[in-house]
Amino acid sequence: MANELFTRDTQAIFWNNNKSAIQRMLDYDYVIQREKPSVAAIVAPTSNNKFEKFFYGTDEVMIPIYRSTAEAVKNHPNADVLLNFASFRTAYDVTNEALDMDQFRVIMITAEGIPERLARLMNKKARQKGVTIIGPATVGAIAPGAFKVANIGGTIENIVKSKLHRAGSAGLVTRSGGLFNELSNIIALNADGIAEGVAIGGDRFVGSVFIDHMLRMEKNPKIKYMILLGEVGGREEYKVIEAIKEGKITKPVIGWCIGTIAKHFSSGVQFGHAGASANAEAETAEAKNKAMKEAGIHVPDNFNDLPLIIKGVYEELKGKGIIGEIEEPNVPPIPEDYNKALAAGKIRKPRNFVCTISDDRGEEAVYAGIPISQVATPDTGYSIGDVISLLWFKKRYPKWATDFIETVIKTVADHGPAVSGAHNAKVTARAGKSVVESLVTGLLTIGPRFGGAIDGAAKYFKYAHDNGLSPKEFLAYMKKQGIPIPGIGHRIKSVRNPDKRVEGLKKYAAEFFPATPLLDYALEVEKETTSKKENLILNVDGTIGILMVDMWRALGYTEKEINEFIESGTLNAFFILGRSIGFIGHILDEKRLGMPMYRHPWDDILYQVEKAQEIK
Amino acid sequence: MAQKPIREYDGKKLFKENWDKYFKGLNYPFESVLVRSGEELKEKAKEKGNEWLNEKALVAKPDMLFGKRGKNNLVLFKVNKPGDVTLEDAAKWIDEKRSGKVKLLSGQEGELTHFIVEPFTPHTEDEEYYIAATTLDENYDVLYMSAHGGMEVEENWDKVTEIKIPIDASDEEIEKLIKENIPSDIPQDKKEVYANFAINFYKFFRDLNFAYLEINPVVIVDKNVYLLDLVARLDDTAGFLMKDKWGEIEFPTPFGMPEKSPEEKAIAEADSKSGASLKLTILNPKGRIWTLVAGGGASVVYADTIADLAGGVEDLANYGEYSGGPTTDETRFYTETVLDLMTREKDPKGRDKILIIGGAIANFTDVAKTFTGIIQAFNEYADKMKDVGVRIYVRRGGPNYEKGLKDIKQAAEKLGLPIKVFGPETHITDIVRMALEDDKKGAK
């Protein structure tokens, strides 16, 4: 164990719920058929969830989430690796706290740009405690066939292609994370893959450096030779050279420092990472490559020849019998990710829901194809009537129609506190319920007896008109059905004392509607009814229902389409929408007044309770 | 880059703003102004608090991150004799100096745009002390002290005392270390005041996240401290911690750096607005080999290999990289910028131009998506590319790379652009070798 960074039993605590990186670790676990998931727990300080689900092959597993590292540590005493995916602002605090817990053997830090002084303090503390820090600014490390940190190695397909799913015989250390993948691939193509690999990170001050890992690899019997990919800047490569000279490293080493280009430019061009800047001649890639070569490290003439050198060293060791044949393990197929397969057009599935009015998938949500910003502000010329026509009917109605819709909404907005809906809303609000709870109790009273006359009027008047019934025949028909005519009659208003709301609607229709055949018919009917009784006038609900039909006819809808609107309750919807304004007003009024719980007085209830009969 | 130089004026301002917390009992007048012209200097002289500009003899020098201003003859401290510079003289001198290009002894060349103006402080050479601190390595900071400051400090480097201070040393340890190591040639009566100044200088350096801080010379007369010349670098990654202490600090472009081209500026601006990374440096706009490389490490490797295999950097036109999952639009913009530069004129020797579209095996960047942006740019620039004779070489791996490679090949062939496309089975930089060998095989 001391010679290996990770084993098949290693478990990590993942700080930050980075779902895709954790899923990649579990995909890797599945490919190498680990018994326990490599992530024991997730720390997410702001999460309210107790766990997160991840795929393990086609199955799903639950990984617990904790709000603090301390809690995760307490519950998972065997997890000795911390994968610190906190941002550069918090990564230091997370590491510092974790170091004090004395549970972690390895801490990997991904953040780039931790303040140098904090990075140095954190690294020093870790060294004193014997904890290996990998990073900052790294993709991490991998022990093929045992444990993989987060995103290192890239996609699972690439991991298998680069033979990172089983141990080979090279030990790999790099600075760059992107080139780590590339090197793994080169080693798989030209040799038998790696047994352990670490990307130490690109920041100026990183926790563990090449020599730390290479001294461990020297003692790891699985590793037969090592490959070091350094960079211009810093002196870490010289520590390796020293170790070779002192005989602390005896296994063959292949080395190369990138950034030889820098010698061609006096200054000013920043090539690569933060750490990649030579402060002295000895820190140039050129000088380091030369020094490595002199120390007996296998150094190519240029990066392009690196594969040849790797192949050469590998084959020599194989020829000597130091490296044997590897039996390739079976790789279970990884089920393809749904979203990826969908994007690639490889799979399809029937949708459970259909939406034809709005779409929130693009840059900006649209109402019937029109972005919200183009309908919202007054300068767009769109009114609330336009928005209703877009979202309810998927058309933009002409101004006379949208103005009519708004007129209707305004007309029905409220009718005082005594109507049953408003009363219910007030009682509920006084019981201490929320706006939405109070509103729905009000809305629930809307139906055949309250507000429902709009639907009914449209339905019956249209039926009569469509079937050519004379007003008299219509009245007879309704009498036969045993239903009072919806939309006819008012409690107090009469021919001599007309309802001003109705007058207004009629006046508007006369002026702006292209034609009003159903209203004309209804007024004929009204003449019949009022001749019988003064207050049997066409009321506001009736007028609205009837004018809606006239509106739709003028807009070119077929009779069948209009019948469908009536059947689906579209007319009632105008009442529901409008009256919600009033209900909310009453509810807010109650809240403002702070009225106490309402209890109906006994003297207003007729109590007539008899003893229940017993049935035997 | 984490360590960034700041102006002398800003460094002194940081001292002033934090003075009482660190140097209680000592007095720092902070009589300094930063100006860009003689006129601005005269305006400053009218401001309250700047009366000294009219009353005292002045010193003026450029404040543009380069040192050795004395040796470069760029310090105005006398007209006829030291200490006779008036406001009028300083203003005139500044306007004179900023009117043309200046070449330093180091060879750097550029225009002088920023000047610091301060009172002339009469003092003797033996009052000039030296103090500096830097981050040595992962374990230690180092504090340098000397009784022999001034222009000749480098020549007197053997008289400088170096103290290695562990980064996690306690205040007591720091005080002990410094007090025990005060240079022996500092006069006995000044040792205590200098030791106290040095201790607090180090704490100030440490707490404000300096990477380097040098005052040469510092002159301490009684309770008064004069910071006569200052050089400083800050660790800019600590910016989020230092908002209150640093304020709005400026990190100027070093003197003599070539002014960025409009294309480089446009890419830098796109970079600053994006979550992805977009970098472009034009090395030689007439160069024949242009690179469009994904990833910081890979971009270096391609540049290295081009220099190694082409026998130098004469042909290498640009250095740059895109990474961190840029959007299709960002990739298109980046590619169009490169193609635009590349197709402005033909190679003077009549050779083909080479476009290297390279990259390592990506961790999570969707290759097909980024290539879509490159293809869109091809559509726009195909005719111009044909006019100057561009040959394209592609190598890339990572998520969705098969589709990306197929798409780019088809698109280029449809447009009649010569292209060769390779995946992870081909060594990352081998396309550089192929491109150069195709040259020999009869391509131009």
Image (tube, helix red, strand yellow):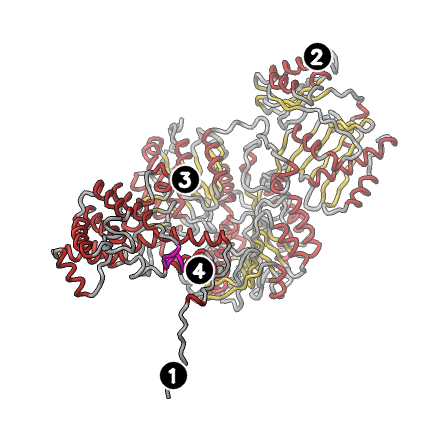
Q: Element at badge 1?
A: loop
- Residue, disc 2: B79
Does the magenta segment cover residue A293?
no
Camera-side residue: B14 or A410?
Answer: A410
What is the three-letter code of the residue carrying label 4? Val
Q: Residue B351 location in percent, x, y?
A: 38, 31
Q: Residue B299 location in percent, x, y?
A: 49, 41
Q: Element at badge 2?
A: loop
Which is nearer the N-term, disc 1 or disc 4? 4
Front tag of 3 and 2: 2
Query: Could you tell me how far apart the alpha carbons at marks 3 and 2 are, in whole angstroms?
Result: 62 Å
What is the three-letter code of the residue carrying label 1? Gln
- Residue, disc 3: B435
Residue appearing at x 60%, y 42% in the figure: B240
Task: Please tell me how crowded label 1 is: few (under 14), some (14-19), or many (20+) other residues with Cα within 10 Å.
Answer: few
Q: Which residues are magenta?
A: A417-423
Judge left or right: residue B419 versus residue B129: left
What is the three-letter code of the residue carrying label 3? Ala
Judge left or right: residue A612 versus residue A503: right
Front tag of 3 and 1: 1
Q: Element at badge 3?
A: helix
Residue A174 at least partly seen: no
Residue appearing at x 30%, y 48% in the figure: A408
- Residue, disc 1: A613
Q: Given contact means CB atoms under 8 Å apart, are the residues at marks 2 and 4 in contact?
A: no
Residue appearing at x 68%, y 30% in the figure: B13
Q: Element at badge 4?
A: helix
Residue appearing at x 57%, y 16% in the figure: B99
Dot label at residue A427: 4
Task: Please tell me how crowded label 4 is: few (under 14), some (14-19), or many (20+) other residues with Cα within 10 Å.
Answer: many
